[in-house]
Amino acid sequence: MKVHYECLSCFITQSQKISELATEDLEKRKEAMIVAAKAVQKYYHRNAVPAIGGSLLFLELYRLLENDDPFKEYKRISNKLAKKVVEELRKELKIGLKDALKLAIAGNVIDFAVGYNPEKIEEDIEHRLNEELYIDESEELFKSLENAKTLLYLVDNCGEIYFDRLFLEKIEEAYPALKIYIAAKEAPIINDATVEDLKEADFGKVGKIVSSGSRIVGNPL
């Protein structure tokens, strides 16, 4: 994604959120925001990649604030609530491959980094499960999986990983010969899932857990 004028306000808003989550010390928070304001000149320019610039800024703040995982509690809450929703869906519904795909897509609403309220998980997921996909290329995906030998699945945020796991279970059932690899961040960055998060969610039962080798938002190539 190319840099956009709104990226500037996002850099600052995220920096404020990180400082508030990382410490109760008001002077430290103020210092962090001064660092963020100065760093904008370095990371916000015409050719910048927002995910990379933002990540480098956030990691600077982590070091300054001496907190390597400010979103830790939010991630724990989102994982707990999402896991509960998935368990209830398993009991209430017969979930097929297409349903699991829709749930994995719906899981993308669970993103604390953009101000999501974790208490809305169940309501949002059930609402989206009953909607049709606006762009539906599921048949093309399933046909590709029939002919594939391996699948590399890149996870995103905590919380939604439990819907990803359900989808991967259904993929494993439908394509038992498929070798599945699931990649997550090497270390914490905002609310992205890490390798440790995947281990805790038992992703090892549906595939091989691997590190993306990165601590940058997204997956820079």
Image (tube, rainbow, N blue to C red):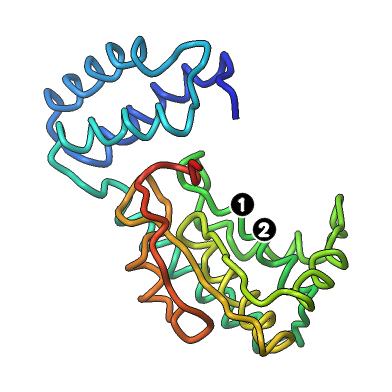
Residue linked to disc 1: 109
Q: Residue at 39% of width from left, 42% of height from top?
A: 216
Among numbered discs 2 and 1, the one appearing first in the sequence: 1
For residue 126, side relative to residue 215 (left or right): right
Residue 198 in the image: state x and y as whole percent. 41, 71
Nearest the eye: 161 or 218: 218
Residue linked to disc 2: 124
For residue 144, side relative to residue 199 (left or right): right
Q: What residue type is labelled 1?
A: Val
Quick one: label 2, few (<14), some, or many (20+) residues within 10 Å? some
Please say if 103 is above or below 187: below
Q: Quadrant of the N terminus?
A: top right
For numbered disc 2, what is the local secondary structure?
helix
Q: Do residues under tags 2 and 1 come within 8 Å of each other at their CB atoms?
A: yes
Please say if 221 is above or below 139: above
Residue 36 sits in which quadrant?
Answer: top left
Q: Residue at 53% of width from left, 71% of height from top?
A: 162
Nearest the eye: 195 or 68: 195
For residue 173, side relative to residue 180 (left or right): right
Quick one: label 1, few (<14), some, or many (20+) residues within 10 Å? many
Residue 90 in the image: state x and y as whole percent. 65, 85
Nearest the eye: 128 or 162: 162
User: Could you give the CA–CA distance between mark 2 and mark 1, rounded to whole angstroms?
Assistant: 8 Å
For residue 2, side relative to residue 48 (left or right): right
